[in-house]
Image (cartoon, rainbow, N blue to C red):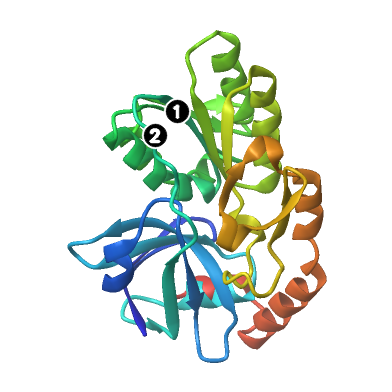
Amino acid sequence: MAVILEKVELAENIKEIVVDAPIIAKKAEPGQFVIVVVDERGERIPLTIADYDRKAGTITIVFLEIGKTTMKLGRLGVGDEMAHIAGPLGNPSEIPENETIVFVGGGVGIAAVYPIARKAKQAGNEVISIIGARSKNLLIWEDRMRAVSDELIVTTDDGSYGRKGVVTEPLKEILENGRKVDRVVTVGPAIMMKFVALTTKPYGVKTIASLNPIMVDGSGMCGACRVEVGGETKFACVDGPEFDAHQVDFDLLIKRLGTYREEEELAKRLFLEEIGGCGECRSHS
């Protein structure tokens, strides 16, 4: 059992929970994830460890309520227990020293990129962060990212906050201006990571993408997280989740992300009917 100690609604359908998980907190590293089972009849879902406190024995998870299981998780409150939580899983992020690193986070991916940027800053790297969301009300963890960055650039698609536009625009400006950039690390929607890779490739800048969105079971046994990297089949959960973005076949990845869409939508619809057919009901916790 894993008890929820804190819960915050960061934005519409985006929740942050702090979970009592001392064994996981003791070993967690940036870039890793946990497998969560909400109840005994629930499915396994992988969620990135957004933060950890070894002394307090807690981990922080940020998630978007997008399907049945994340909606069920979002209905739990402080004091409630999840049936199971296992981790840390996946390979930790590679943290270099004395480099200039640009971190690009989009949506919920901002929380996932945060611990990597923090550790990179602690290791003596120059950290430039670019974070983006569709609009101001969906932007999360700006203060946290600012605290670990030498420079922070914020974008919104609709221009309601920060720069109007997408995250690849300031990234391209930085590269075009000839600023020293040793590597780029990106976490977010697959389509965003694809265009980050396309932006950096002409400049020969090492680019790392975290392929969390494709993971399902998280153990390498289901095969759902197969990705093609450099012409070879890899499993995001056990071989990653981070890969050389210039070697990832993002078109295949995006296509495979839709494999279970029909089943996911059916499960979501049935769950909403079960709880009363009201999307707002899942927020009353």
Tell me what residue is drawn at x 58 percent, y 33 percent. Answer: 207
Residue 200 in the figure: left or right of residue 10? right
Furthest residue toward bottom: 40
Q: Which residue is mark 2?
A: 96
Tell me what residue is drawn at x 63 percent, y 21 percent. Answer: 204
Mark toward the viewer: 2 or 1: 2
| For marks 2 and 1 on the same chain, the one whose residue lies earlier in the sequence | 2
Residue 236 in the figure: left or right of residue 114? right
* Relative image position of residue 249 (x, y in whole percent): 76, 44
Tell me what residue is drawn at x 75 percent, y 59 percent. Answer: 257
Count of numbered circles in the view? 2
Residue 106 in view, yes or no: yes
Q: Amino acid at mark 1?
A: Ile
Image quadrant where residue 216 sits: bottom right
Quadrant (top left, top right, bottom left, bottom right) of the C terminus: bottom left
Check disc 1: other Cα within 10 Å, few if <14, some if 14-19, many if 20+.
many
Q: Give the secondary structure at mark 2.
A: loop
Quadrant (top left, top right, bottom left, bottom right) of the N terminus: bottom left
Tell me what residue is drawn at x 57 percent, y 65 percent. Answer: 65
Check disc 2: other Cα within 10 Å, few if <14, some if 14-19, many if 20+.
some
Report, in whole angstroms, how far the alpha carbon at label 2 lies from the one at label 1.
Answer: 9 Å
Q: Give the secondary structure at mark 1.
A: strand
Q: Amino acid at mark 2?
A: Pro
Q: Which residue is mark 1?
A: 101
* Relative image position of residue 143 (x, y in whole percent): 34, 39
Image quadrant where residue 159 sits: top right
Residue 143 in view, yes or no: no
36 vs 186: above or below: below
* Relative image position of residue 241 (x, y in whole percent): 56, 54
Q: Are marks 2 and 1 in contact (CB under 8 Å)?
A: yes
17 vs 187: above or below: below
Q: Nearer the viewer, residue 203 or 5?
A: 203
